[in-house]
Image (spheres, rainbow, N blue to C red):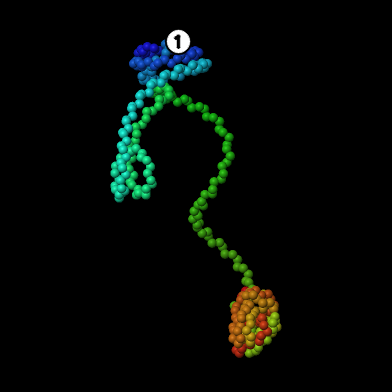
Amino acid sequence: MGATGAAGPAGAAGATGATGPTGAAGATGATGPAGAAGATGATGPAGAAGPTGATGATGPTGATGATGPTGAAGPSGATGATGPAGAAGATGATGPTGAAGPSGATGATGPAGAAGVTGATGPAGAAGATGATGPTGATGPAGATGPTGAAGPAGAAGPSGATGATGPAGAAGVTGATGPAGAAGATGATGPTGATGPAGATGPTGAAGPAGATGAAGPTGAAGLTGATGATGPANGLNAYGGLYSTVPQTLNLTVGGTTQIPLATAGPVKNATYVPANSIVVANPGTYEINYSTTLTAAVATTLTLAVRVNGVNVPSATISRVLAVGTSSLFNGSTIITLTAGSAVDLALSALLAVGITLGSGVNATLTVKQLD
């Protein structure tokens, strides 16, 4: 194939003809030298559309000319039928591999020296050439480990084997400059509005706003009529109270499992209460009462003694005291409690013990019991 001649000036662009059938692919010939790129001629006026000529051989790629103005878009031509694929071209021969350089000669091995007497280990000398291997002698004692000798030089690399045949890749063509963007098309008509989507979840409640300023006070209303006068209330002071105490020295003999009432022979002031039956305070008003009590006594036998305030013969839990007494030792039991009583409730003091025992109430005030209504 001869050298490609210089490219002539570009002719006027003809109209696009009908697509012809694809011809069979010819064998790939040797690539000739690239011809000099011709100058791009000025674009002539469009000539009349001529018939499509036969496809000529592909010339070398010329230099990229300046980008011309974008012409008006013509109508799209009909798409031609796809032609059959051409046969693959033959692969070019692989070039020969260059000869490998010769390896350097190996030096001769020196003789082994005679073994001398083992002396103190001296400093490591330079590594000598390796001598021929002598016969194996008897195993001697292990000597001190000497320093590691310097590493010998690396041998020359052997020649590489021949590489199989892959042809060289062809050179990539130059990418042409990007043409200017076409004018934007007109905006299409607005499509119909889509159906309304479901309502989103309710967002969290916002923080409460600050409280508004307090309004001005309104005018004072007219005074209402005076109500009827109520009944006269009770005089200041307690509505009910009473008290009993004892000053008589005496001994009370307690039995196992029994309960003995403490005699309270002396009566104090009383209001809305009575002292019948004896040694008791019976309240007339229902309500809340404060009860105060005390006694001082001595046991003839060491035992556990219980003092209790009773209401209608039943111990009041908040006014029940149990204590272990030593023989002949005077002990004081006292306390105060607030309970609710119904009208007619009888309040008294009683003793009980784990053993049969004599309990002595000494001289002076040895027992007291008072009640007073709080509400």
Residue name at image x 49 percent, y 55 percent: 213
In the displayed structure, 155 sits above or below 167; it is below
**Image quadrant where residue 361 sits:** bottom right
Whether residue 105 is visible, yes or no, is: yes
Residue name at image x 46 percent, y 17 percent: 89
**Image quadrant where residue 48 sits:** top left
Residue name at image x 33 percent, y 47 percent: 146
> Please, what is the three-letter code of the amino acid marked with disc 1?
Gly
Which of the pair 80/33 is nearer the observer? Answer: 33
Which of the pair 284/350 is nearer the observer? Answer: 350
The local secondary structure at tag 1 comes to: loop
In the displayed structure, 213 sits above or below 324; it is above
The residue that label 1 is drawn on is: 53
In the displayed structure, 184 sits above or below 242; it is above
In the displayed structure, 133 sits above or below 340; it is above
What x and y, as percent, mark residue 347? Answer: 67, 79
Residue name at image x 32 percent, y 32 percent: 106
Give the side of residue 221 with respect to residue 12, left or right. right
What x and y, as percent, mark residue 277? Answer: 70, 83
Q: Quadrant of the C terminus?
A: bottom right
